[in-house]
Amino acid sequence: MSKRGTQRTRGSTKPASSAKASATLNTHGITAVTLFSGRTFYASREKTFRFSKAGEVSFSSGIDEHGIDDNIDSDLRVILRKLTKKDSTTKIRAFNELRDYCDANEKDDKIQAILPFFVSHYRKWSIDPDQRVRDECQLTFDTIGTRMQKKLLPHLKTLLPIWLMAQCDSYAPAASKAKFLYTKLFYSVERQAEAVYFAGNEIMTTLTDEINQCSDALKDKKENEMETDDAHERRLTQVLLALALFLNYLEEKKRAELTGYFKTIFDSGKFWKLDQIKSIKIQSSFYRCLEDL
């Protein structure tokens, strides 16, 4: 017989603490994400745990090391595996095949099955050294994003930091495609500002990390590493322009809510030394960023 005021359970089982359960999940690399519907999903690289309204947990396994679900059709699996290859030509062909697959399938659930994989690899493709890969990535994102629209919302905080950077790509065709999709899905300046504010913490965290990593790499550059230096130079330019774009969207009151992130960036000696790097692109984007402060 249970004591008065305590939670009743069947048999001798002990009621679970939601806080304790959440902490246990977090220690195993499982993150809680609350969607606009109010339901909570827990996601890890190995499995997805879905909590129903009744509190029951269902497991969806069968995810390979690349994040590809074994439950999707075999033709799609082949295409997605090609996208994990290092060879640029293979990836470019695979992007074409993926767009053809999307066009050939009228049911949105077929396209939605691609989203977790695409979102997890979007960052890598968007900063690929080969501008053709970056361009194909944004073109494919346009195809998927146009079909999915509101179904992108659960992934928006993950996508937006890199999506902003993609709009500032030094390769104009890739940048214009990323920008076109953004303005198509968020068709007014107000909606665009709402979107970046919604993902403000994630955007500032990503951009801060990128500034630190790229500035360190360029500081230690060697003459025989020109390819790597070019890549870091391009990324740092993108990050600074993305930060300027982000600042341009925010009203003064909303900027104040992110003071901690700005303090982290601007109190760092690394940021103020960026104008000393011998790169016209970096210096130009650095002063553009200061202009929008």
Image: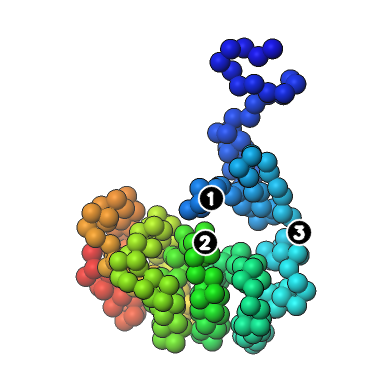
Q: In the image, residue 95 lies at what x, y percent?
A: 62, 82
- Quarter residue 64 falls in: bottom right
Question: Who's the residue at 69% across and 53% down the image?
Answer: 47
Please state if 238 lies on the left or on the right of 97 as rendered. Answer: left
Q: Amino acid at mark 3?
A: Gly
Which residue, given by chain and number where applicable, does mark 2 sit on? 155
Question: Who's the residue at 52% across and 59% down the image?
Answer: 154
Distance between the alpha carbons at the discs numbered 2 and 3: 21 Å
Please state if 155 lies on the left or on the right of 2 as rendered. Answer: left
Distance between the alpha carbons at the discs numbered 3 and 1: 21 Å
Is residue 26 depicted above or below 136 in this figure? above
Callout 1 crowding tier (Cα within 10 Å): few <14, some 14–19, many ≥20: some
Q: In the image, residue 131 lies at what x, y percent?
A: 51, 85
Q: In the image, residue 236 lies at what x, y percent?
A: 40, 72
Which residue, given by chain and number where applicable, does mark 3 sit on? 62
Circle 1: element type: strand
Q: Amino acid at mark 1?
A: Val
Q: Amino acid at mark 2?
A: His
In this rendering, the count of numbered labels is: 3
Is residue 25 depicted above or below 290 in this figure? above
Which residue, given by chain and number where applicable, does mark 1 sit on? 33
Question: Who's the residue at 44% across and 77% down the image?
Answer: 181
Callout 2 crowding tier (Cα within 10 Å): few <14, some 14–19, many ≥20: some
Please state if 140 lies on the left or on the right of 65 as rendered. Answer: left
The colour style of the image is rainbow
Distance between the alpha carbons at the discs numbered 2 and 1: 10 Å
Image quarter in which the C terminus is found: bottom left
Image quarter in which the N terminus is found: top right
- Quarter residue 109 falls in: bottom right
Is residue 26 depicted above or below 165 in this figure? above
Circle 2: element type: helix
Q: In the image, residue 183 lies at what x, y percent?
A: 38, 75
